[in-house]
Amino acid sequence: MSVLEFVLIALGFVFGLGATAWLTVRYDLRKANFRGERIPSIAGLAFVLAGDFIYGFEWLAGGEASRIFAAYFLTLMGFGILGLFDDLAGDRSVGGFRGHFRALAKGRLTTGAVKALGGGVLSLGAGWLIGDGNLWRFILAAALIALSANSLNLLDLRPGRCLFAFFCGAAALTVVLANVHQLNVGFSLFVAVGMAAILYPMDAGGQAMIGDTGANAFGGVLGVAASVILPPVWQAVVIALLIAFQFWCERHSLSKTIDGNPVLRGLDRKIGVRR
Protein backbone atom coordinates (compact mmCIF):
# COMPACT_ATOMS: atom_id res chain seq x y z
CA MET A 1 0.00 0.00 0.00
CA SER A 2 1.45 3.34 -1.04
CA VAL A 3 1.77 6.51 1.04
CA LEU A 4 -0.89 8.11 -1.18
CA GLU A 5 -3.32 5.32 -0.35
CA PHE A 6 -2.67 5.73 3.38
CA VAL A 7 -3.37 9.47 3.06
CA LEU A 8 -6.49 8.75 1.01
CA ILE A 9 -7.80 6.37 3.67
CA ALA A 10 -7.07 8.85 6.47
CA LEU A 11 -8.86 11.66 4.65
CA GLY A 12 -11.81 9.42 3.85
CA PHE A 13 -12.17 8.28 7.46
CA VAL A 14 -11.97 11.83 8.82
CA PHE A 15 -14.57 12.97 6.30
CA GLY A 16 -16.94 10.07 6.94
CA LEU A 17 -16.76 10.18 10.72
CA GLY A 18 -16.88 13.97 10.89
CA ALA A 19 -19.83 14.34 8.52
CA THR A 20 -21.80 11.61 10.27
CA ALA A 21 -21.20 13.14 13.70
CA TRP A 22 -22.30 16.56 12.44
CA LEU A 23 -25.47 15.20 10.81
CA THR A 24 -26.34 13.21 13.94
CA VAL A 25 -26.08 16.29 16.17
CA ARG A 26 -27.62 18.72 13.67
CA TYR A 27 -30.73 16.62 12.98
CA ASP A 28 -30.85 14.65 16.25
CA LEU A 29 -30.59 11.32 14.44
CA ARG A 30 -31.13 9.09 17.44
CA LYS A 31 -33.42 6.14 18.15
CA ALA A 32 -34.30 3.94 21.09
CA ASN A 33 -32.21 0.77 21.18
CA PHE A 34 -33.34 -2.64 22.48
CA ARG A 35 -32.93 -1.31 26.03
CA GLY A 36 -35.04 1.77 25.32
CA GLU A 37 -32.07 4.16 25.37
CA ARG A 38 -31.88 6.89 22.72
CA ILE A 39 -28.55 6.61 20.93
CA PRO A 40 -27.12 7.73 17.54
CA SER A 41 -28.83 5.58 14.91
CA ILE A 42 -26.88 6.01 11.66
CA ALA A 43 -23.24 5.45 12.64
CA GLY A 44 -22.93 3.20 9.58
CA LEU A 45 -23.20 6.29 7.38
CA ALA A 46 -19.58 7.01 8.29
CA PHE A 47 -18.54 3.92 6.32
CA VAL A 48 -20.70 4.87 3.33
CA LEU A 49 -19.20 8.36 3.12
CA ALA A 50 -15.62 7.32 3.87
CA GLY A 51 -15.69 4.25 1.65
CA ASP A 52 -17.15 6.02 -1.36
CA PHE A 53 -14.65 8.85 -0.95
CA ILE A 54 -11.86 6.27 -1.19
CA TYR A 55 -13.40 3.92 -3.77
CA GLY A 56 -14.50 6.83 -5.92
CA PHE A 57 -10.99 8.25 -6.03
CA GLU A 58 -9.52 4.86 -6.97
CA TRP A 59 -12.19 4.34 -9.61
CA LEU A 60 -11.60 7.74 -11.23
CA ALA A 61 -7.84 7.15 -11.13
CA GLY A 62 -8.38 4.39 -13.70
CA GLY A 63 -6.25 1.31 -14.10
CA GLU A 64 -6.92 -2.41 -14.41
CA ALA A 65 -9.11 -2.54 -11.31
CA SER A 66 -11.29 0.47 -12.17
CA ARG A 67 -14.38 -1.68 -12.87
CA ILE A 68 -13.98 -3.39 -9.49
CA PHE A 69 -13.67 -0.06 -7.69
CA ALA A 70 -16.75 1.12 -9.60
CA ALA A 71 -18.61 -1.95 -8.31
CA TYR A 72 -17.54 -1.19 -4.74
CA PHE A 73 -18.58 2.45 -5.17
CA LEU A 74 -21.99 1.60 -6.63
CA THR A 75 -22.70 -1.09 -4.04
CA LEU A 76 -21.70 1.04 -1.08
CA MET A 77 -23.49 4.16 -2.27
CA GLY A 78 -26.66 2.35 -3.32
CA PHE A 79 -27.07 0.11 -0.30
CA GLY A 80 -26.10 2.99 1.97
CA ILE A 81 -28.85 5.20 0.53
CA LEU A 82 -31.45 2.41 0.71
CA GLY A 83 -30.47 1.61 4.27
CA LEU A 84 -30.56 5.27 5.27
CA PHE A 85 -34.02 5.61 3.75
CA ASP A 86 -35.20 2.64 5.81
CA ASP A 87 -33.53 3.99 8.97
CA LEU A 88 -35.18 7.39 8.62
CA ALA A 89 -38.58 6.44 7.22
CA GLY A 90 -38.88 2.69 7.77
CA ASP A 91 -42.13 1.02 8.80
CA ARG A 92 -41.32 -1.68 11.38
CA SER A 93 -44.88 -3.05 11.44
CA VAL A 94 -43.96 -5.39 8.57
CA GLY A 95 -40.97 -7.73 8.61
CA GLY A 96 -39.30 -10.34 6.42
CA PHE A 97 -39.39 -10.81 2.66
CA ARG A 98 -42.77 -12.50 2.82
CA GLY A 99 -44.27 -9.71 4.89
CA HIS A 100 -43.03 -6.94 2.62
CA PHE A 101 -44.08 -8.66 -0.60
CA ARG A 102 -47.46 -9.64 0.81
CA ALA A 103 -48.00 -5.96 1.58
CA LEU A 104 -46.86 -5.11 -1.95
CA ALA A 105 -49.34 -7.62 -3.41
CA LYS A 106 -52.08 -5.77 -1.53
CA GLY A 107 -50.98 -2.46 -3.04
CA ARG A 108 -48.95 -1.22 -0.07
CA LEU A 109 -45.34 -0.31 -0.85
CA THR A 110 -43.23 -0.62 2.31
CA THR A 111 -39.71 0.74 2.77
CA GLY A 112 -38.56 -2.86 3.12
CA ALA A 113 -39.94 -3.69 -0.33
CA VAL A 114 -38.24 -0.59 -1.77
CA LYS A 115 -34.99 -1.73 -0.20
CA ALA A 116 -35.38 -5.29 -1.50
CA LEU A 117 -36.23 -4.23 -5.06
CA GLY A 118 -33.62 -1.48 -5.11
CA GLY A 119 -31.00 -3.82 -3.67
CA GLY A 120 -31.74 -6.34 -6.39
CA VAL A 121 -31.23 -3.75 -9.12
CA LEU A 122 -28.02 -2.52 -7.47
CA SER A 123 -26.69 -6.06 -7.18
CA LEU A 124 -27.33 -6.66 -10.87
CA GLY A 125 -25.50 -3.43 -11.74
CA ALA A 126 -22.49 -4.25 -9.57
CA GLY A 127 -22.52 -7.84 -10.83
CA TRP A 128 -22.41 -6.59 -14.42
CA LEU A 129 -19.33 -4.49 -13.60
CA ILE A 130 -17.59 -7.44 -11.94
CA GLY A 131 -18.66 -9.97 -14.59
CA ASP A 132 -17.18 -7.85 -17.41
CA GLY A 133 -18.96 -9.86 -20.09
CA ASN A 134 -18.84 -13.24 -18.32
CA LEU A 135 -22.45 -14.34 -17.70
CA TRP A 136 -21.64 -16.92 -15.00
CA ARG A 137 -19.46 -14.50 -13.08
CA PHE A 138 -22.15 -11.81 -13.39
CA ILE A 139 -24.83 -14.10 -11.92
CA LEU A 140 -22.63 -15.25 -9.04
CA ALA A 141 -21.53 -11.71 -8.17
CA ALA A 142 -25.07 -10.31 -8.23
CA ALA A 143 -26.35 -13.11 -6.00
CA LEU A 144 -23.47 -12.80 -3.54
CA ILE A 145 -23.91 -9.05 -3.17
CA ALA A 146 -27.68 -9.17 -2.65
CA LEU A 147 -27.57 -12.10 -0.22
CA SER A 148 -24.62 -10.76 1.77
CA ALA A 149 -26.27 -7.39 2.23
CA ASN A 150 -29.52 -8.90 3.47
CA SER A 151 -27.79 -11.50 5.67
CA LEU A 152 -25.84 -8.91 7.64
CA ASN A 153 -29.00 -6.85 7.92
CA LEU A 154 -30.78 -9.85 9.47
CA LEU A 155 -28.00 -10.15 12.04
CA ASP A 156 -28.19 -6.50 13.08
CA LEU A 157 -30.72 -7.06 15.87
CA ARG A 158 -28.35 -6.76 18.83
CA PRO A 159 -25.14 -4.77 19.39
CA GLY A 160 -22.06 -6.19 17.72
CA ARG A 161 -23.63 -9.12 15.85
CA CYS A 162 -23.51 -7.66 12.35
CA LEU A 163 -19.95 -6.35 12.57
CA PHE A 164 -18.72 -9.56 14.23
CA ALA A 165 -20.12 -11.54 11.28
CA PHE A 166 -18.48 -9.05 8.92
CA PHE A 167 -15.11 -9.57 10.64
CA CYS A 168 -15.49 -13.35 10.33
CA GLY A 169 -16.25 -13.10 6.62
CA ALA A 170 -13.42 -10.64 6.01
CA ALA A 171 -10.99 -12.88 7.92
CA ALA A 172 -11.93 -15.88 5.78
CA LEU A 173 -11.42 -13.87 2.58
CA THR A 174 -8.07 -12.58 3.86
CA VAL A 175 -6.89 -16.16 4.41
CA VAL A 176 -7.75 -16.93 0.79
CA LEU A 177 -5.89 -13.81 -0.37
CA ALA A 178 -2.81 -14.71 1.66
CA ASN A 179 -2.74 -18.25 0.26
CA VAL A 180 -2.74 -17.00 -3.32
CA HIS A 181 -0.31 -14.17 -2.48
CA GLN A 182 -2.65 -11.46 -3.76
CA LEU A 183 -3.13 -9.29 -0.67
CA ASN A 184 -3.05 -6.20 -2.91
CA VAL A 185 -6.43 -7.27 -4.31
CA GLY A 186 -7.90 -6.84 -0.85
CA PHE A 187 -7.32 -3.07 -0.55
CA SER A 188 -11.03 -2.28 -0.74
CA LEU A 189 -11.89 -4.96 1.82
CA PHE A 190 -9.23 -3.68 4.21
CA VAL A 191 -10.76 -0.19 3.99
CA ALA A 192 -14.06 -1.67 5.16
CA VAL A 193 -12.35 -3.65 7.94
CA GLY A 194 -10.65 -0.48 9.17
CA MET A 195 -13.92 1.43 9.45
CA ALA A 196 -15.63 -1.58 11.05
CA ALA A 197 -12.88 -1.67 13.68
CA ILE A 198 -13.56 1.98 14.51
CA LEU A 199 -17.33 1.52 14.73
CA TYR A 200 -17.35 -1.83 16.52
CA PRO A 201 -16.64 -0.59 20.09
CA MET A 202 -19.53 1.90 19.85
CA ASP A 203 -21.89 -0.59 18.26
CA ALA A 204 -21.02 -3.53 20.54
CA GLY A 205 -21.11 -1.29 23.61
CA GLY A 206 -24.62 -0.09 22.83
CA GLN A 207 -23.45 3.51 22.43
CA ALA A 208 -24.46 3.85 18.76
CA MET A 209 -26.22 1.84 16.06
CA ILE A 210 -24.77 1.23 12.63
CA GLY A 211 -28.38 0.91 11.46
CA ASP A 212 -29.61 -0.58 8.19
CA THR A 213 -27.34 2.02 6.59
CA GLY A 214 -24.27 0.28 7.95
CA ALA A 215 -25.51 -3.32 7.93
CA ASN A 216 -26.50 -3.22 4.25
CA ALA A 217 -23.34 -1.35 3.29
CA PHE A 218 -20.94 -3.71 5.07
CA GLY A 219 -22.83 -6.72 3.73
CA GLY A 220 -22.82 -5.44 0.18
CA VAL A 221 -19.10 -4.69 0.25
CA LEU A 222 -18.40 -8.13 1.71
CA GLY A 223 -20.36 -9.62 -1.19
CA VAL A 224 -18.34 -7.66 -3.74
CA ALA A 225 -15.10 -8.79 -2.08
CA ALA A 226 -16.23 -12.43 -2.08
CA SER A 227 -17.15 -12.25 -5.77
CA VAL A 228 -13.70 -10.86 -6.60
CA ILE A 229 -11.63 -13.11 -4.32
CA LEU A 230 -13.31 -16.54 -4.19
CA PRO A 231 -13.21 -19.07 -7.05
CA PRO A 232 -16.60 -19.73 -8.71
CA VAL A 233 -17.21 -23.06 -6.96
CA TRP A 234 -16.78 -21.50 -3.51
CA GLN A 235 -18.95 -18.57 -4.51
CA ALA A 236 -21.73 -21.04 -5.35
CA VAL A 237 -21.28 -22.77 -1.98
CA VAL A 238 -21.51 -19.46 -0.11
CA ILE A 239 -24.61 -18.48 -2.09
CA ALA A 240 -26.30 -21.77 -1.17
CA LEU A 241 -25.49 -21.25 2.52
CA LEU A 242 -26.79 -17.67 2.46
CA ILE A 243 -30.02 -18.73 0.75
CA ALA A 244 -30.53 -21.37 3.43
CA PHE A 245 -29.93 -18.73 6.10
CA GLN A 246 -32.53 -16.42 4.53
CA PHE A 247 -35.18 -19.15 4.50
CA TRP A 248 -34.35 -20.17 8.06
CA CYS A 249 -34.68 -16.58 9.31
CA GLU A 250 -38.09 -16.28 7.63
CA ARG A 251 -39.37 -19.08 9.87
CA HIS A 252 -37.42 -18.69 13.09
CA SER A 253 -36.36 -15.99 15.54
CA LEU A 254 -32.59 -15.65 15.47
CA SER A 255 -32.40 -14.02 18.90
CA LYS A 256 -34.62 -16.68 20.51
CA THR A 257 -32.55 -19.45 18.93
CA ILE A 258 -29.32 -17.92 20.21
CA ASP A 259 -30.75 -17.40 23.70
CA GLY A 260 -31.94 -21.01 23.77
CA ASN A 261 -28.51 -22.47 23.02
CA PRO A 262 -25.92 -22.20 25.86
CA VAL A 263 -22.92 -22.14 23.50
CA LEU A 264 -24.38 -19.55 21.14
CA ARG A 265 -25.70 -17.51 24.05
CA GLY A 266 -22.26 -17.41 25.68
CA LEU A 267 -20.60 -16.33 22.43
CA ASP A 268 -23.32 -13.76 21.75
CA ARG A 269 -22.75 -12.09 25.12
CA LYS A 270 -19.07 -11.71 24.35
CA ILE A 271 -19.86 -9.98 21.06
CA GLY A 272 -21.79 -7.08 22.58
CA VAL A 273 -23.89 -5.86 25.49
CA ARG A 274 -27.19 -7.66 26.03
CA ARG A 275 -28.56 -5.94 29.15
Image (cartoon, rainbow, N blue to C red):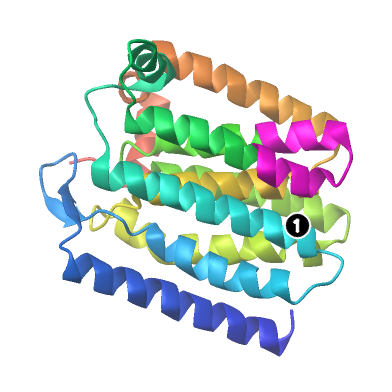
Is 241 situated left or right of 36 in this image?
Answer: right
How packed mark 1 is, by other alpha carbons closer than 10 Å (few <14, some 14-19, many 20 or more), is many
Residue 29, image quadrant: bottom left
Q: Is residue 137 magenta?
A: yes
Name the foreground residue: 223 vs 263.
Answer: 223
Q: Secondary structure at mark 1?
A: helix
Q: Is residue 251 above or below residue 43?
A: above
Q: Is residue 21 magenta?
A: no
Q: Is residue 148 visible?
A: yes
Q: Position of residue 5 (x, y in %)?
A: 67, 81
Under mark 1, the amino acid is Ile
Q: Quadrant of the N terminus?
A: bottom right
- Report the residue at 58% width, 17% height from top: 244
Residue 121, image quadrant: top right
Q: Position of residue 103 (x, y in %)?
A: 33, 15
Q: Is residue 100 above or below residue 213?
A: above
Q: Is residue 273 visible?
A: no
Question: For the magenta stretch, what is the residue range?
Answer: 124-143
Is 161 situated left or right of 259 in this image?
Answer: right
Is 199 situated left or right of 147 in this image?
Answer: left
Name the foreground residue: 25 vs 233.
Answer: 25
Residue 21, image quadrant: bottom left
Residue ID for mark 1 = 68
Q: Position of residue 107 (x, y in %)?
A: 33, 16
Q: Is residue 24 above or below residue 165?
A: below
Q: Main secondary structure of the magenta part?
A: helix
